[in-house]
Image: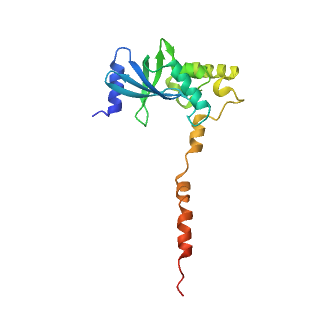
Amino acid sequence: MLCPALLALLLLLASPAGAATVLSVGDGDTLRLSDGAKRLTIRMACIDAPETAQRPYGAASRQRLQELAPVGSVVSLRPQSIDKYGRTVAEVFRNGQNVNLAMVNSGQAFAYRKYLAACDGSAYLAAEVAAQQQRVGVWAVPGGIQRPWDWRKGTRPPVASTAALFLPAVLPRRIRRPVLV
């Protein structure tokens, strides 16, 4: 039996042009689409955009994606896989333009080197170099901002540190316990 996400991908691949309507823009590399009765969350392939909390770059990236793929617009997809969160990973096209590549070219996303093999990697890297040379978007600061993949690693607290938050409440009770002589 096929999982629902895989079934959605297969149905999407079977559709004539993989056309879908943009319902919302989550952040700089995530779209929610409608393909008739089907609802899909798309993780844009081969790019990584700043997280929303990476102010002001996350908001600027989301805004650029809203300009390239506005709500209500029709896009087509070149699906590649399903990620661990059940999202369809795909290149997104609107009016013949590769939206993923346009995000990198405008400096609003990085070429995601870890996953470039599924795309035209040289085009993504060239777009990133062009944005860096023009000092636009994430490249407005020398060397660019902290990469989203590094930022995510640094913002997730380890499990041990979460437990440490409760230690001060526990320790004083143990200290206050009367000692029997």
Q: Is residue 134 visible?
A: yes
Quadrant holding the N terminus: top left
Q: Position of residue 118 (x, y in %)?
A: 49, 24
Locate residue 31, reporting x and y percent: 46, 26
Q: Is residue 53 above or below residue 98?
A: below
Q: Residue furthest left?
A: 1
Q: Position of residue 114 (x, y in %)?
A: 55, 31
The quadrant holding residue 129 is: top right
Quick one: which residue is furthest to the top in this view?
A: 96
Q: Residue at x 70, y 30 (%)?
A: 143
Q: How many labels were placed on the picture?
A: 0
Q: Is residue 121 visible?
A: no
Q: Residue at x 53, y 80 (%)?
A: 178
Residue sticking out furthest to the bottom: 181
Is 131 on the left or on the right of 24, as rendered?
Answer: right
The residue lying at 33 percent from left, 25 percent from top is 38
Name the colouring of the figure.
rainbow
- Give the side of residue 132 with respect to residue 175, left or right: right
Question: What residue appears at the point 55 percent right and 51 percent down from the top-left corner?
Answer: 158
The C terminus lies in quadrant: bottom right
Q: Nearer the viewer, residue 22 or 3?
A: 22
Image height check: is 1 above or below 132? Answer: below
